[in-house]
Image (cartoon, rainbow, N blue to C red):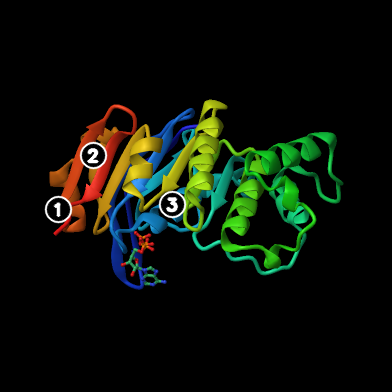
Amino acid sequence: MTLEISGLSLSRGGRPVLRDVSAAFAPGSVSVILGPNGAGKSTLLDAMAGLRAADAGTVRLNGVALADMPHRERARRIGYLPQGGEVHWNLRVHELVALGRLPHRGAFAGESGADRAAIARAMAAADVAALADRPVLALSGGERARVLLARVLAGEPELLLADEPLANLDPRHAVDALRLFRRAADAGAAVVLVLHDLQAAARAADQLLLLADGHCLAQGDPAEVLTPALLAEAYGLEMLVRQDAEAGLIVAPKVV
Ligand SMILES: Nc1ncnc2c1ncn2[C@@H]1O[C@H](COP(=O)(O)OP(=O)(O)OP(=O)(O)O)[C@@H](O)[C@H]1O
C-alpha cells in the first residue's frame, strides 16, 4: 500500500502551513518526519490520514485519491495515532484496544476469532496484556500511550501513521515501540512516524523528511538528512553528528 503525496499545499487559519510537499511511502518501510515546532509535521500526517483537505496537490493510496476512498475502507487501511494520547471514555484497556477492530467488523457483528487474535497480538506487542482489566483513565501517561498504540495495531493497518508515539515512553518502552514499528513494516505496512528525537529517528528510519516552515528541506536516508548543515538550517542549532560502531548515527546538540 504505497502512499504518494504530490505537490501538497495546505493552509490553516488563512496561513500557508504546507507548501508544495511531495513524497512517497512504500510498504515495508519506516519513514520519519522531522522538523522544528510549527513546521507542519502534524498537519502533513493529518493530510496523509485523509483528515485535512489540501488547497492544492494530491494524496493517493495505491493510486486512489484519499478523498475518493469510502470512509470505511480508509479506516481499514489506515491506522492513525494522534499526538497527545487523550482518552475521553473510561473504558477498560481490552475494550479500548478492541475498538481498533471496528472498521473490520460488519454492522452489528460481534468479535470474530480473527478479531480476538489480532487484539491479543496487539496487546502483547505493546506490552499491555497485564493491564487488560484496568480502567484507561487510571493508567500512567506512558501506559496509556502503549494502550493507544495497541488499539492502532489491532486494526492491522496497511498504512500506520503515528504522531510523536515515543512521547511519555521510558527508554525501554521507546526502544520496544521502535522495534514494533519495524515489525509492522516487515509485515508489509508502510509506517510513518513524526518524531522529535533525532537519535530515535536515525535509528528507526529508512527514509527521513525534514520539514521547515511548511516545506520539505531534505528527504533521504538518515545519513543524507542528518547532517550538521541541514540540521542547523532547520533548527537554528549547531549539532554534532558522529558514526558509532555500536550505536550507529549519534546526533546531539553542541554544548555551548
Ligand atoms: N487550528 C489552527 N489554526 C490555525 N493555525 C494552526 C492551527 N493549528 C496549527 N496551526 C499552525 O499550523 C502550523 C503547523 O502546525 P503543526 O501542528 O502541523 O506543526 P508541527 O510541526 O506538528 O509542530 P509541533 O512540533 O509543535 O507539534 C503552525 O504554524 C501552527 O501554528
SS of the residue under disc 3: helix
From the Cβ of disc 3, is ligand 1 less than 8 Å away?
yes
Percent of width and height locating residue 211: 27, 51
Asked if the residue at tag 3 contacts the one at tag 1, i.e. Cβ–Cβ closer than 8 Å, the answer is no
- Lateral position of residue 25 relative to residue 160, left or right: left
Query: Could you tell me residue 158's position as x and y percent?
Result: 57, 35
Residue bearing the label numbered 3: 45
Classify mark 3: residues with Cα within 10 Å, few (<14), some (14-19) or many (20+): many
**Which callout, 1 or 3, points at the residue further toward the start of the chain?**
3
Q: Which of the 4 image quarters holds residue 114? A: top right
Whether residue 6 is visible, yes or no, is no
- Nearer mark to the viewer, of 1 and 2: 1
Image: 109 above or below 91: above
At 28% from the left and 58% from the top, the residue drawn is: 36
- The residue tagged 1 is 238
Q: Residues within 10 Å of mark 2 (few under 14, many from 20)?
A: many
Secondary structure of the residue carrying numbered label 1? loop
